Image (tube, rainbow, N blue to C red):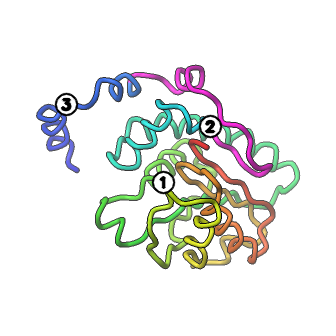
Amino acid sequence: MPEILESVLNFVFPRDSRVRDLELLTAEDLRSKLPKAKLYKDNSIALFDHQDEGVRRIIWEIKYNKNKQLAFTCAELLAEELLDFMREKRQFYPQAKFILLPVPISDKRRRRRGYNQTELVADCIKKMLPNIHYCKQTLRRDMDRTSQTKKTKTERAKNVSGCFSIINTSHIKDNIIIILDDVTTTGATLDEIERNVSKHSPKELMRLTISH
């Protein structure tokens, strides 16, 4: 959306004051004020606890309102976590590349929404970490399925089964793969992606999300 049009819309339809308050917070403010996510899997990094109202509001703003400010602030924190991770792994895999794969959305949802919220965050991370290889065309979503929101863990797993494929396997082999999503609940989506990626011999896999 052009910046002038976006400014006009913000004036005519002012955003919720709670959103404006969140936009004023720095990355360190978010880190100190919002509850940290509990580790749910060894190969995972999640910033915040999704049960918190403020965290859910941030996810909503990035996902449905294309909130670039909140996407950038969350990306700062994710980049910090990634930098520590990359320094550690570089000792063991000096030749491996770090490949950032944003979870794709279907063509139908992209047309309706106009963007992929995970790519919005990934774009920011790439600017902060130029040594990471951002490969947004490597992972493809082949099928559009119904929303995961109200499904059980078993239903979520069935719903995403067979949804993803790898376009360029050369990006995967012998490299360290970082799968980026905005939020994970049961982990069904990331489980399915990890299953596909693991077939192509990565050195390691890491899941990276804003909330869990």
- Asked where in the image residue 166 lies, by quadrant, the reply is bottom right
Look at the image and tell me in which quarter the C terminus lies. top right
Asked whether residue 126 appears in the rendered view, the answer is yes
- Among the two numbered marks 1 and 2 on one chain, the one whose residue lies closer to the N terminus: 2
Give me the residue at 63% from left, 68% from top: 157
Q: How many marks?
A: 3
Q: In the rendered structure, are the residues bearing label 1 and label 2 in contact, judged by CB atoms less than 8 Å apart?
A: no
- Among the two numbered marks 2 and 3 on one chain, the one whose residue lies closer to the N terminus: 3
Label 2, residues with CA under 10 Å away: few <14, some 14-19, many ≥20: many
- Among the two numbered marks 1 and 3 on one chain, the one whose residue lies closer to the N terminus: 3
Side (left or right) of 50 relative to 105: right
> Label 1 belongs to which residue?
118
Q: CA distance from mark 1 to mark 3?
A: 25 Å
Magenta stretch holds residue 27: yes
**Relative to residue 202, is residue 181 depicted above or below?**
above
Give me the residue at 60% from left, 40% from top: 78
- The residue nearer to you, when weighing 80 against 196, is 196
Label 3, residues with CA under 10 Å away: few <14, some 14-19, many ≥20: few
Give me the residue at 52% from left, 40% from top: 75
- Asked where in the image residue 187 lies, by quadrant, the reply is bottom right
> Label 3 belongs to which residue?
14
Residue 29 image position (x, y, % from top left) = 53, 20
Q: Which secondary structure lies at badge 1?
A: helix
Label 1, residues with CA under 10 Å away: few <14, some 14-19, many ≥20: many
Q: Amino acid at mark 2?
A: Leu
**Relative to residue 189, is residue 43 depicted above or below?**
above
Q: Amino acid at mark 1?
A: Thr
Which numbered marker is on residue 47?
2
Q: Amino acid at mark 3?
A: Pro
Residue 98 image position (x, y, % from top left) = 69, 57
The segment highlighted magenta reads: 24-46
